[in-house]
Amino acid sequence: MQALELEKFLPYRLSVLAQLVSESLHDLYAGPYGLSVTQWRVMAALGRFAPLTASDVGQRIVMDKVAVSRAVAGLMKRGLVERSADLDDRRRASLHLTPKGRAMHADIVPLALRYEAELYQALSAEERQILNGLCDRLFTHAKLLRSPP
Amino acid sequence: MQALELEKFLPYRLSVLAQLVSESLHDLYAGPYGLSVTQWRVMAALGRFAPLTASDVGQRIVMDKVAVSRAVAGLMKRGLVERSADLDDRRRASLHLTPKGRAMHADIVPLALRYEAELYQALSAEERQILNGLCDRLFTHAKLLRSPP
DNA sequence: ACACAATAGTTACATTTGAAACTAATTCAG
DNA sequence: CTGAATTAGTTTCAAATGTAACTATTGTGT
């Protein structure tokens, strides 16, 4: 029988690496700004592409609508995000950052980019490109495997 | 100001990829065998290195002791794992798979390896090595960043 | 026009997870 | 030796998450 060496098993390694990185990044903005990972992702999406509907946000950041709804509720309660009704389709509502939300976003973006830059120190410029390419192809392939052809 | 493009942001990409892969794999053994991700990881560690104490398991699979404790409780309730007291140090207890647990482990390992092989289809043999090397270095570096020198 | 399916988003309930407190056993300092 | 500090592991309580049901609105087929 083949042996499963967990420490060399790709799904396991990806999971451990992603978790470590995600937690490290979270440490940077959780304390000072009191945001959860999902809340920060919603803010990042809105900071770049607002106005977006909740579904748009979900599509962009690969998050289901319940999670988006909860994150948005929390952000609105803190006055970081506003909602304006869509008159064409009253089920929809477009979301955007408030001035306060924009300010926080502007604070956090450099922190996040700096962390990414520090992480990338481990790799050469060429290796960074290679890594990104490989991740893309793995992701595309994994999606294919999931909904079999 | 620099812009944060979430879809090109390394921590985000790693997180999305790892989650997709982890869920796909989970689909393979969750239904038929009713194991959670953490339970499966504990079984994988024991299948390969038993006997281990709970702390040993935690070290191997990068999981905190509370999670290990809960996973082990569930596995013992189902008769997949057994505990034998350590007479030298009665705080410790070494864990190992039961015959039933070993049988399930033997069922699942090929499924997991097959999934990994399918995933690796997206890459050439050389690229697989490169990816593993890059992940290793990122992981080591991310750990360094976390507990600053 | 009208019933019926589909879509946006929220709420409710059950399960999982995390942090901290707790128990029990061991080690170490004086 | 004895009491404080450590270590292994469990339990508890609160917060996060997933699933499914629900409301409200829009689209579709006949």
Image (cartoon, coloured by chain):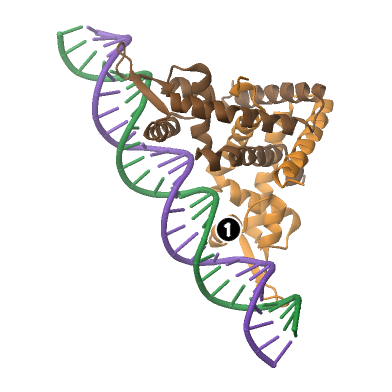
Chain colours: A orange, B brown, C purple, D green
Q: Where is residue D25, by image quadrant?
A: bottom right
Q: Position of residue A56 (x, y in %)?
A: 71, 59
> Residue under circle 1?
A66
Q: Is residue A64 above or below residue A21?
A: below
| Closer to the camera in the image, B99 or B97 | B99
Measured as percent of width and height from the top left, residue C13 is found at 41, 60
Q: Is residue B140 above or below residue B13?
A: above
The one of A89 and C30 positioned closer to us in this rendering: A89
Q: Which residue shows up at 47% across the image and 30% down it? A: B64
Q: Secondary structure at mark 1?
A: helix
Residue B49 in the image: above or below residue A98:
above
Viewer-nearest residue: B57 or C11: B57
Chain letter of disc 1 in the image: A
Asked if residue C14 lies left or right of residue A64, the reply is left
Q: Residues within 10 Å of mark 1 (few under 14, many from 20)?
A: few
Q: Residue A7 at what x, y percent from top left? A: 60, 22
| Drawn side of residue D8 relative to residue D22, left or right | left
In the figure, is residue A104 to the left or right of B86? right
Look at the picture and state if A109 lies above or below B122.
below
Q: Amino acid at mark 1?
A: Val
